[in-house]
Image (tube, rainbow, N blue to C red):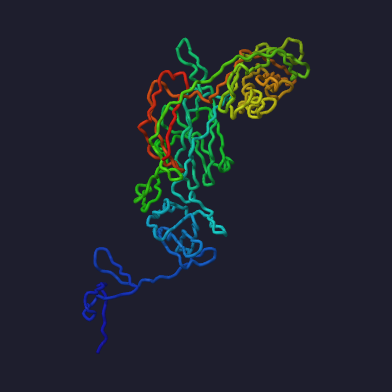
Amino acid sequence: MGNVKRHFIKGRMNKSVDERLVPNGEYINALNVRLGSTEGSEVGSVENSKGNTKLTTLQYKGVDLTTAQCIGSFEDGVNETIYWFIHDGSHSTPVDMIVSYNTNTDLLIYHVVSTSVLNFNPTFLITGVNKVEDLLFFTDDINPPRKINVTRSYLEPTAGHVDQITEDDISVIKKPPRKAPTLQLIDVPGEENYLETNFVSFSYRYKYIDNEYSALSQFTDVAFESSPFSIDPDTNFNDGMLNRYNTAVVGVNTGGDDVVGIDICFKLGNDSDVRVMQKYIKEEAGWPDGVVQTVNFTNQQIYTLLPSSEILRLYDNVPLVAQAQTFMGNRLMYGNYEDGYDLTTATGARIDTNYTASLISQNLSTSLSLGSRNDGVNYTIDTASTVTAINADAFINFSSINQPLVAGGVFGFGFTVSHKGFSGSGQSGAYPITVQHPTFTISFTFNLPQSYNSIFEMVESPEFKAQLGSNLGGSFQPVGNCSNGSTFTDIYNCSIVAPSGYTLVNTGVTAGGQGVFLSSDSINEDEFSVQILAAQYNNTSSPNNQYFEYFEVSNVTFTYQSESSNKSLHSNRDYEVGIVYMDKYKRATTTLTSSQNTVFVSSVNSSRITAFGLLYRLI
């Protein structure tokens, strides 16, 4: 009997007939076979296919993981790399991993190793995985949607199996600043007052380590405090509606170690455009983590505009958990997701949203009083003689103000300064400076950071002396650099104009380089005085030719207001109040209303400070 030869030109498996009747060109079974085909015809080829080969072994702390389970994978064909997600729960300390293997280089990389944060569960497979450049996104329907940077190293657990990563390191959603920036208004000498007629409010956002930007924080109140009421008889305009401050000190929290940059932003009250006031890189600015850094906002400049959509981006709309994930139109999208929270307290009590809004109305407790002048104070800044100046000491007695000095109150004083006399080279009484110094008005405002028992206790406090820049304490700038300071001494020095041909080189009372002289009396705790400084001028062409100018004060007034702000609701109108709850990522509920959330402010409250009060209960 001759040999039976068969060929497999048809390349087709046929299991429907008896093996003795299989037509030539077909076969009934095959192992390790791969069938290739060509386009446009049924012609194909059959070739042997390689079997599986073990390429690597996973380890944790030097011990092989023999019972590990793969619960998800992703093939990066461009880079010949496979990523897979591992869970091993057979040990006393469960271990989760995200690992990659490059088939070209045989390089095995442990991207993330975790004992608690990854929290993988073999019941919840990771079926939604996408890679965008160096970012690997994934979700598993039990944990929040996550992502890692495959080029960055994530710290492994310690010897005690404690994770060194946190949820924030791998979460898709990034925390925006939860609170608005802090805001303090001050008056800086020599600055144009861009805030004078503009209603400006501030916000900021974080730049994260993977070049991701957070949503904007909440905005501050407008940086505006009105001047005293004043009607122009010619125009009938209220000239008091000008900002009495020209500089806003904006304070921002620098965030965690994953925040690399901060954008400080602002918007005007009459438009919705958000402008970037300044961009800061924390490392370059020398800013540590988790502290408040302050920046001054003064003049209008050319600012970068953010996209108009940023004003509506209150938070990143990332679900709590999601089963499916994909990219569509450059957007990361989730399916079968869970969103929103139950409105309960930390103890599980339900929050009753049937709240009641009420009107809070109180008198604006502002007191305005006249100070006085103290005659006959001595100056020895001119070492050649002692000069007794008349009316150079502003004297303030607080006994007429029947209000307690409470935290949040505002104390201020002001007076007019004019030329009094000269001394200096020659001492002849005939000075080459013939043009008297122009009169100027200067004021000082102190926001009480705490309550004080007396005016003496307030004046002697370190914070009052520091803001005044007095001889008893406070850091003020040299006269040539006064525009960079913010104390009362700096403002005073910047108000002095040197005569033509002369340079202002010093101010002081007993010597040059001093701050205004502050004097208080522990016996009479309701009064203190501020002695203004004399000015020293040097001739520009002959520095040894020195002259000293002395000044007097007039129109001394001081005010005290127990409330830190004059802001109030408009009267003769209705208001509707809503409540919004936020989580730590600033994801917010819709505005929750109530059947009792409306308030009417009648016209009888037009001269009072009005605000809202809310009453609600937990059930």
The quarter of the picture where residue 440 lies is top right
89 left or right of 418? left
Q: Is residue 193 above or below residue 11?
A: above
Residue 4 visible in the current orientation:
yes
Q: Residue furthest bottom?
A: 1
Q: Residue 305 versus residue 39: which sits nearer the camera?
A: 305
Q: Is residue 78 above or below residue 423?
A: below
Q: How many marks?
A: 0
Residue 356 left/right relative to 522 = left
Q: Quadrant of residue 603?
A: top left
| Figure quadrant of the C terminus | top left
Give whichever of 30, 199 is nearer the camera. Answer: 199
Q: Quadrant of the N terminus?
A: bottom left
Residue at image coords 42%, 59% = 121
Q: Nearer the viewer, residue 114 or 477?
A: 114
Q: Nearer the viewer, residue 156 or 596?
A: 596
Q: Is residue 476 visible?
A: no
Residue at x 72% of width, y 23% of height: 512
Q: Position of residue 50 (x, y in %)?
A: 38, 71
Residue at horizontal 37%, vertical 38%?
590
Percent x, y for residue 49?
Answer: 36, 71
Considering every residue shown, the one lying at the far right of the view is 384
Q: Position of residue 124 (x, y in %)?
A: 39, 58
Along the horizontal axis of the image, is 415 left or right of 9? Answer: right
Is residue 460 rendered to the left or right of residue 32?
A: right
